[in-house]
Image (cartoon, helix red, strand yellow):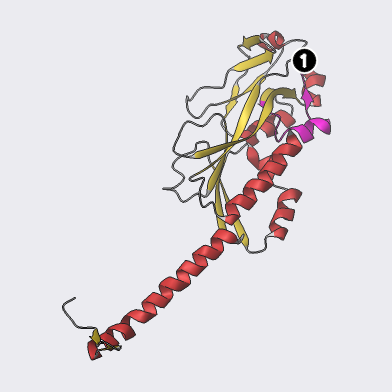
Amino acid sequence: MKIRLFNRTTRSVSLTDEGRRFYEQVMPHLAGLEEAAVAAAGGASAVRGKLRVNLDPVCYRAILGQRLDHFMDAHPELEIEFIARDHLGDLVLEGFDLALRFGEPRTSSLVARKLLDTAVVTVAAPSYIARRGRPAKPEDLEGPGHRCLEFRNSETGKPFPWEFHRKRKKTVIAPRGRLTVNDPGALLNACLAGSGVAQMLLFGAEQLIAEGRLISLFPDWPDERYPLYACYPSRHHVPAKTRAFLEFVVELANAHS
């Protein structure tokens, strides 16, 4: 800096006038840095602050509810922001702490933790079955007597294929239907209203099946599975808020498995 900050002798060190002025100007900034470091360290060990979650829309029904209320009550200093996305995107660039996504991860730059495999079920409302009858086998859905609700794949722009798996046997059908949606909530609502037969994930729909509001049509074709992953930027120095939420989601996943 080309200025002398200290007077040094063999027995002592003291500030020069320039050194004293430098100290008075810099010290408040150093204190602020120290406070920021302490706050950051506290955030790494305490469950608090805002947690931003990139959420597969299918997860909403399974996550929101009484269990989440209990989790929030247990962590009163935590705020959660769920952003529903039909794609993963760039977690770091977009400021997300983690993502919950169905399907196999396509990037190796993130830590991907598999939470569960959920079944794909083919369902209809009792009102639909009363009006059009219950199909006896998957191929019946290709006939003129049935109407299917299709779900668009955001990556291909086309409806997901209708597959049925039983051990090593796989059947693919071309369903008859005139309604295609790209939102899981819209698919569920249309199915509940009796508008048609739908394929959806058991995760989030099993309570409706247990209550009789939806009927699983082909329980003898149970082996098509779909994985749920938690993805986050780093395996090291995971903040306490992220760890706590992951534990909560693992408990949910275990309850559904």
Relative placement, left or right, of 149 versus 87 is right
- Camera-side residue of 62 and 76: 76
- Camera-side residue of 87 and 142: 87
Residue 213 can be seen in this image? no
Q: Which residues are magenta?
A: 200-218
Q: Which residue is drawn at the image coordinates 37% and 76% (left, top)?
A: 29
**Relative to residue 72, is residue 117 depicted above or below?**
above
Q: Which residue is drawn at the image coordinates 64% and 10% (left, top)?
A: 170
Residue 198 can be seen in this image? yes
**Relative to residue 129, is residue 70 depicted above or below?**
below
Give the quadrant of the N terminus: bottom left
* Farthest bottom residue in view: 17
Relative placement, left or right, of 60 versus 219 is left
Q: Secondary structure at mark 1?
A: loop
Q: Which residue is drawn at the image coordinates 78% and 35% (left, top)?
A: 207
- Camera-side residue of 122 and 74: 74
Question: Residue 225: x and y, percent?
Answer: 65, 23
- Camera-side residue of 49 and 124: 49
